[in-house]
Amino acid sequence: MQSRRFIDRAIKQLFFLAATLSVLVLLGIFGMLLMNGIKAFEHISLTEFFFSSNWNPAAYGKPSYGIVAMLFSTFLVTFGAMCIAVPLGIGAAAYLAQVAQAKTRLVLKPIIELLAAIPSVVVGFIGIVMVGPFIAKVFGLSNGLTALNGSILLAVMSLPTIITVAEDAIRSVPNSFKEGSYALGANQWTTLTKVILPASYSGIIAAIILGMGRAIGETMTVLMATGNALAMPHGFFDPVRTMTATIAIELGEVPYGTTHYYSLFAVGALLFLISLGINLIAENIAAKYRYKA
Amino acid sequence: MKTKLQVKDLHLAYGTKKVLKGITMDIPENKIVALIGPSGCGKSTLLRAMNRMHDLSPEVHIMGEILLEGDNIYAPGRDAVDVRRKIGMVFQKPNPFPKSIFDNIAYGLKIAGQHDKQQLQEVVERTLKSSYLWEEVKDDLDKSALSLSGGQQQRMCIARAVAVEPEVLLMDEPCSALDPISTAKIENLMLELKKDYTIVIVTHNMQQAQRVADLTAFMYFGEVIEYAPTEELFGNPQVELTRNYLEGNFG
């Protein structure tokens, strides 16, 4: 009796520890980024960091630390990826959840999930040897390694996330909504667009946000496939270098403890805050539109 | 007495399991017909066959005919969407869409192509009045239908079904999830609605069948055992099985 209660309590503590640990790790990471990042601003003005588009920390004599170009590049590539992945992903999710026969679904679903298992370096490779040249050919560019290339690849990479989460959301819409709609003389398309998708709104938003998080944080693929030009891009046909790629490229070679070193942490901290913000917004939307079953 | 809906030798199977075994019955216009019988006797299945709800389940096989004013709703090429527009349905559990009250009721009209705001408003008001819900919700039309009580939700679902002006209204145990007061309101509503509609109701509640139905069919294991005017069926059942059931010996 005594020992059972002890085990009970011990297990409870164990789970509590596990939960706290993940929170601590999260806080630890952010703290580390922040502590290091803040040191960068001993030598860089906030104005330069946030409003200059000139990033050249290794320049002899007068280095520059403006992140606007890479910030914009990150948003550009992510936005492009979402423009492709959201309609495709929701369409696929709706098809899987509502239209497809059980057999079809049983085949398609694992294949889509397998898409997530492709290593990002392989996706980047495909971007360099196939998608990039294809883009160059179609649009008559001298170089296909552009923001568009990155967008297409990131779209493919975020599709499994979007499809899986959105499909769950759509599937969880009570069958009674569907029947109610059909009973009023609605066809399948109307039922889907007017009743089922609106009813799964919060889940679909969550799916999009998660996909977006995947795209923003992705490093290797964009590093390989977007050309890594530091200049401010003018559109999807320009090569870009995202925040993630910048950190990955430069952190390995930067001397420890320099302003350049700390500035990369500042970029990382900002990236962290962006992801955090996106997730908070998603949580908020999801909570607001969650309906009672 | 004009026949509105005619079921002719209807067989239905879920996969290999036979659920309806040759149902034949005539449903007269502007009457309420109740389907009673023990759980699993096929009454809900029969009701759902009447507006082709089973089309959504690929494992269901149907043979036989159901004629709406002489036209077989299962005829090849007959559009199920068109059938359901003429034969509406109210479900056992109230199923308001997660939309406003107004949008719930306007839904059927909107998808049929009616977008005139004035017209929609008129229909919403009229149908809510006809389901005696107007006074309770007229200031809350923009609020979510999910904020209504269960009884209100069900009356709203009836209003929603009526808004598209079907010819027949099918009701699958519409009061089983409701309290006695809400039930009484819906029964009164049904008696009111039968002036304009033909109603078929599935019910487990014998008193309800006696209160509202003009005709009652007793079903057992996928067959209609007895189908007669309600008073006759309850007062003087002709079949032994019916009498046993009504006396509460099984079911």
Image (tube, grey):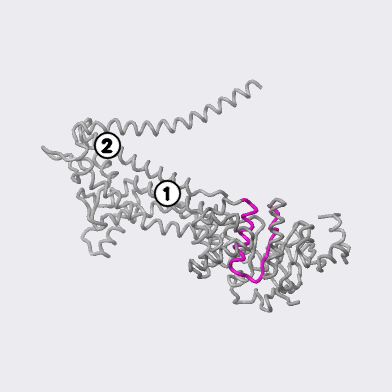
> What residue is at 22 percent from the left and 30 percent from the top?
A257
Q: Chain of mark 1?
A: A
Asked if the stretch drawn in magenta spans residue B151, the answer is yes
Q: Is residue A126 left or right of residue A198?
A: left
Residue bearing the label numbered 2: A266
Image marks 1 and 2: residues in contact by CB distance under 8 Å: no
Image: B84 above or below A9: below
Relative depth, front residue between A293 and B121: B121
> What residue is at 34 percent from the left and 47 percent from the top?
A216
For the residue marked with disc 1, what is the amino acid? Answer: Ala
Per the model, the C-alpha gap separating discs 1 and 2 is: 31 Å
Please provide percent x and percent y for residue B216: 79, 65
Label 1 neighbourhood size at 10 Å, few (<14), some (14-19), many (20+)? few
Relative depth, front residue between A5 and A227: A5
Q: Is residue B34 left or right of residue B165?
A: right
Q: Which mark is residue A117?
A: 1
Secondary-structure class at tag 1:
loop
Asked if the stretch drawn in magenta spans residue A157, the answer is no
Specify the segment rendered in magenta: B149-177
Image: B159 above or below A272: below
Choose top left, top right, bottom left or bottom right for residue A275. top left
Q: Which mark is residue B213?
A: none
Give the mark toward the camera: 1 or 2: 2
